[in-house]
Image: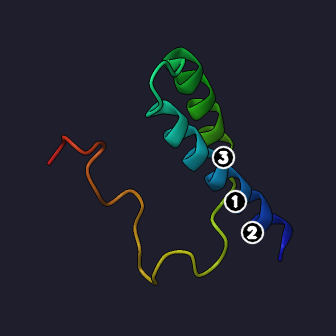
Amino acid sequence: MCPDCEDFARTVLLLGQLALYADVAGADLDFVEAVSLSLAVSLPEPPPETFPDGYDSDGGPASAGDC
């Protein structure tokens, strides 16, 4: 696996585990917010062929509520 692919996969895995933790009763949501933002900012460029050809990451709404 290429180094960028490994970093991307590890970061996405950590974000997923953090999301699961956030749903646990008594989870420290301040911790979740701080760490999730740090992980999201640290995401490397996605490995080639992660998204289909022509995919525009800036083409959608800024957030799920914006249409």
Side of 41 relative to 54 (left or right):
right
Name which residue type carries label 2.
Cys
Question: 43 or 25, which is in the foreground?
Answer: 25
What residue lies at 69% left-to-right and 54% top-to-bottom? 44
Image coordinates of residue 21 in percent, x first then y, are 54, 35
Q: Secondary structure at mark 2?
A: helix
What residue lies at 64% left-to-right and 54% top-to-bottom? 13
Image coordinates of residue 4 in percent, x first then y, are 78, 65
Side of 60 relative to 27 (left or right):
left
Q: CA distance from mark 1 to mark 3?
A: 10 Å
* Mark 2 crowd level (few <14, some 14–19, many ≥20, 10 Å Cα): some
What residue lies at 55% left-to-right and 26% top-to-bottom? 32
Q: Residue furthest front?
A: 25
Task: Look at mark 3 in the image and give the residue it sits on.
Answer: 14
Asked whether the beta carbons under mark 1 and mark 3 sit within 8 Å of each other, the answer is no
Side of 33 relative to 58 (left or right):
right
**Quarter holding residue 62:** top left
Q: Secondary structure at mark 3?
A: helix
Name which residue type carries label 3.
Leu
Task: Look at mark 1 in the image and give the residue it sits on.
Answer: 8
Disc ID at residue 54: none
* Mark 1 crowd level (few <14, some 14–19, many ≥20, 10 Å Cα): some
Asked whether the beta carbons under mark 2 and mark 1 sit within 8 Å of each other, the answer is yes
Vertical position of residue 37 compared to residue 47: above or below: above
Task: Look at mark 2 in the image and give the residue it sits on.
Answer: 5
What residue lies at 64% left-to-right and 32% top-to-bottom? 38
**Quarter holding residue 3:** bottom right
Q: CA distance from mark 3 to mark 2?
A: 14 Å
Q: Earlier in the sequence, mark 3 or mark 2?
A: 2
